[in-house]
Amino acid sequence: MTDASKLSVIRCAASSAAALSTVFVLCWLAATLFGPIGSHMFVTMFTPAPPGSFVALGAGLCWSIVFGAAVGGLFAAFHNWIGHWQRP
């Protein structure tokens, strides 16, 4: 596998953490502004606090960053590992 087709684990982890935390904040805002709609279920994936509370925002934001980074890092690691099976 060439270096051009490898993914940076750090870059993927940071990008996934940023994306997941952004989605979390948008869902928290929707739960705060509009009450119990579909987005509150996403908020409860990261914290047991009431979906529209500031405790949910703080705890959920931290956990969404951690889980987003873990998923992005794992994705890049598996992508690079599976790339070794690529035919020349």
Image (cartoon, rainbow, N blue to C red):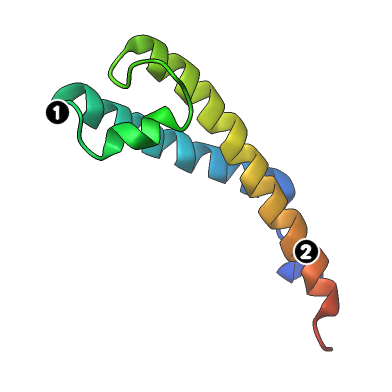
Q: Residue 34: x percent and y percent?
A: 14, 28
| Mark 1 → mark 2, Cα distance in angstroms | 42 Å
Q: Amino acid at mark 1?
A: Phe
Residue at disc 1, secondary structure? helix
Name the residue at 22% across, 22% down.
Answer: 32
| Foreground pick, 31 / 80 | 31
Identify the residue shown where x is 80% and y is 82%: 86
Q: Check the image and report above or below for 30 versus 12.
A: above
Q: Residues within 10 Å of mark 1 (few under 14, many from 20)?
A: few
At mark 2, the secondary structure is: helix
Quarter-wise, where is residue 75 in the image? bottom right
The quadrant in which the C terminus is found is bottom right
The residue beneath circle 2 is 80
Q: In the image, residue 51 lies at what x, y percent? A: 32, 22
Label of residue 83 in the image: none
Q: Position of residue 28 (x, y in %)?
A: 31, 27
Residue found 55% across the figure and 44% down from its top? 16
Residue 26 visible here: no
Name which quarter of the figure residue 65 lies in. top right
Name the side, left or right, on which 44 lies relative to 78: left
For residue 83, above or below residue 33: below
Q: Earlier in the sequence, mark 1 or mark 2?
A: 1
Q: Residue at x 71, y 50 (%)?
A: 74
The residue where tag 1 is placed is 34
From this viewpoint, is residue 58 visible?
Answer: yes
Left of 33 or right of it: where is 54? right
Residue 23 horizontal side relative to residue 52, left or right: right
Kind of residue sitting beneath label 2: Asn
